[in-house]
């Protein structure tokens, strides 16, 4: 039984799919494609991937939908400010459509590099303008909209449950809202469903309300219900989506359709860098490409993210990713050292192996406890005798972990020995020269614990993989 947290009820509960056929329907908020995605974004999609893999490990079929926001919604959740897509197009001297395609490709390339199991349907907002208009018309018919000079707005005061997701009553939300920029709105929390745009705006569509473009929140309501129906299992996103984007999506869904649409909301906490927020001004917004230039593979980053539960903030540092890289390399070496080892396990050993298998499933089914699941794998590799059965189970665990554990990259002669290991070997040589054999032995242990072996030669030493 999978247990998952629900941001709406704020409780962990047993997961059952709505449909009897065991297909889980899931919607994931995708990126706005005006820039290269950074590793924080990737944490959110790695979380979506982990959830998909855990569902599949439990023999559910998954039908996932993800949107690509290629309409230039405006810079803040509140639909004010500049259009990100058009700003980027101007800067790069490209059309908005070229910008959208370029960054969509870059995004998908990163997902592939991270072994992310892609949603079955990836859909563009610009292909669904009519569905969004229809959704707004339904809201209008049900009496939840009003028109002001710059667009059609949703009246949040008419939805009694507004604020339930973020756990704030409307009054509290209103009190906390920043100084209102749009004095025409009835309530500060009201949001645009359709924005009128001026002639110069590149992306614009005709509608019964006037020429304009859709608000961001209506995208996900329209596309989610189009592909997954009026009642579906799971909706995911980053934690920043919870207080506004998803609150608004719930309001739109319930008020257009008259009932709840999403059964369970799951949100991934933020990735921080060096203990703080990523920001362009601090120069700490890294992409996968930046990591690879520094010698870290996408799967090193994947391993790094698995070490923290998706519901906790995770702190990225280069020291931490270095140790993830070392650990992953060692893990692969250990897994592969079991390959083709024809050893018949005793009945006690088989029982032990079965317990590891159960412990792994229990961990991932406990609200996707990936750090615990990784720990089970390490314990299994340390405690079990080498055998092809251990290898087979590790590879089965990798259906969830997605770390390419079947590939022994360490076989590759061209693979470089990390500097850190070379430095340890040098220090060990110095210790031997100084006849400090205790220190030399300690350094050898350190080297071996990271998956390398040091051999003394007449000229110094040689390092190889364990
Ligand atoms: P955006 O393209 O800005 O809508 O972001 C794409 C996804 O990345 C959303 O699900 C965000 O919630 C998520 N996201 C943005 N920054 C971070 C971060 N630092 N850590 C984790 N997820 C993030
Ligand atoms: Zn969304």
Image (cartoon, rainbow, N blue to C red):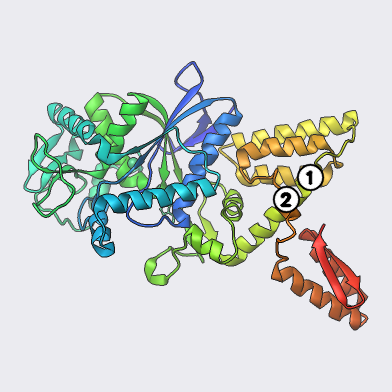
Image coords of residue 369 (percent x, y): 60, 42
Q: Which secondary structure lies at badge 1?
A: helix
Instruction: Give the camera-side residue of 209 and 268.
Output: 209
Disc 1 vs disc 2: Cβ atoms closer than 8 Å? yes
Image coords of residue 318 (percent x, y): 58, 66
- First reached walking from the N terminus: tag 1 or tag 2: 2
Furthest residue in direction top, as rendered: 20
Q: Which secondary structure lies at badge 2?
A: helix
Instruction: Give the camera-side residue of 169 and 153.
Output: 153
Figure quadrant of residue 64: top left
Figure quadrant of residue 94: bottom left
Furthest residue in direction left, as rendered: 149
Q: Quadrant of the N terminus?
A: top right
Q: Count residues near mark 2 (Cα–Cα under 10 Å), then give few for <14, some for 14-19, many for 20+.
A: many
What's the mark number on residue 381? 1
- Determine which residue is flagged by label 2: 331
* Left or right: 329 in relation to 73: right
Q: Count residues near mark 1 (Cα–Cα under 10 Å), then give few for <14, some for 14-19, many for 20+.
A: many
Residue 112 in view here: yes
């Amino acid at each position: 039984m999978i247990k998952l947290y629900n941001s709406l009820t704020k409780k962990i509960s047993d997961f059952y799919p709505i449909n009897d056929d065991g297909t889980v329907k899931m919607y994931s908020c995708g990126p706005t494609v005006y820039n290269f995605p950074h590793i924080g974004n990737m944490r959110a999609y790695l979380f979506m991937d982990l959830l998909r893999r855990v569902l599949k490990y439990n023999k559910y079929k998954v039908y996932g939908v993800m949107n690509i926001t290629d309409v230039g919604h405006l810079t803040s959740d509140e639909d004010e400010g500049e259009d990100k897509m058009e700003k980027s197009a101007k800067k790069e001297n490209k059309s908005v459509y070229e910008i959208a395609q370029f960054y969509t490709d870059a995004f998908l390339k990163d997902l592939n590099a991270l072994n992310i199991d892609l949603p079955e349907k990836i859909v563009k907002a610009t292909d669904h303008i009519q569905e969004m208009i229809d959704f707004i018309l339904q809201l209008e018919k049900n009496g939840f909209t009003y028109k002001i000079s710059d667009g059609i707005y949703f009246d949040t005061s008419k939805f009694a449950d507004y604020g339930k997701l973020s756990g704030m009553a409307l009054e509290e939300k209103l009190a906390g809202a920043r100084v209102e920029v749009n004095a025409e709105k009835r309530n500060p929390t009201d949001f645009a469903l359709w924005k009128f745009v001026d002639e110069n705006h590149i992306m614009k569509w005709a509608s019964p309300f006037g020429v304009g473009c859709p608000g961001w929140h209506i995208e996900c309501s329209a596309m989610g219900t189009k592909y997954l129906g009026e009642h579906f299992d799971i909706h995911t996103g980053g934690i920043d989506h919870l207080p506004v984007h998803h609150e608004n999506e719930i309001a739109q869904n319930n008020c257009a359709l008259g009932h709840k649409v999403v059964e369970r909301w799951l949100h991934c906490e933020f990735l921080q860098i060096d203990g703080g927020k990523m920001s362009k001004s601090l120069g700490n917004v890294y992409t996968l490409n930046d990591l690879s230039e520094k010698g870290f593979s996408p799967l090193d980053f994947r391993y790094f993210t698995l070490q923290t539960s998706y519901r906790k903030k995770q702190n990225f540092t280069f020291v931490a990713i270095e140790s993830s890289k070392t650990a992953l390399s060692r893990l692969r070496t250990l897994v592969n050292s079991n390959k083709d080892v024809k050893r018949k396990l005793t009945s006690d050993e088989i029982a032990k192996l079965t317990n590891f298998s159960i412990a792994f499933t229990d961990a991932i089914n406990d609200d996707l406890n990936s750090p615990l699941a990784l720990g089970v794998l390490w314990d299994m590799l340390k405690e079990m005798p080498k055998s092809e059965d251990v290898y087979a189970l590790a590879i089965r665990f990798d259906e969830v972990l997605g770390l390419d554990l079947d590939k022994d990259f360490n076989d590759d002669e061209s693979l470089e020995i990390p500097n850190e290991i070379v430095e340890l070997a040098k220090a060990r040589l110095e210790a031997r020269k100084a006849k400090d054999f205790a220190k030399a032995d300690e350094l050898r242990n350190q080297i071996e614990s990271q998956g390398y072996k040091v051999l003394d030669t007449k000229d110094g030493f040689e390092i190889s993989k364990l």
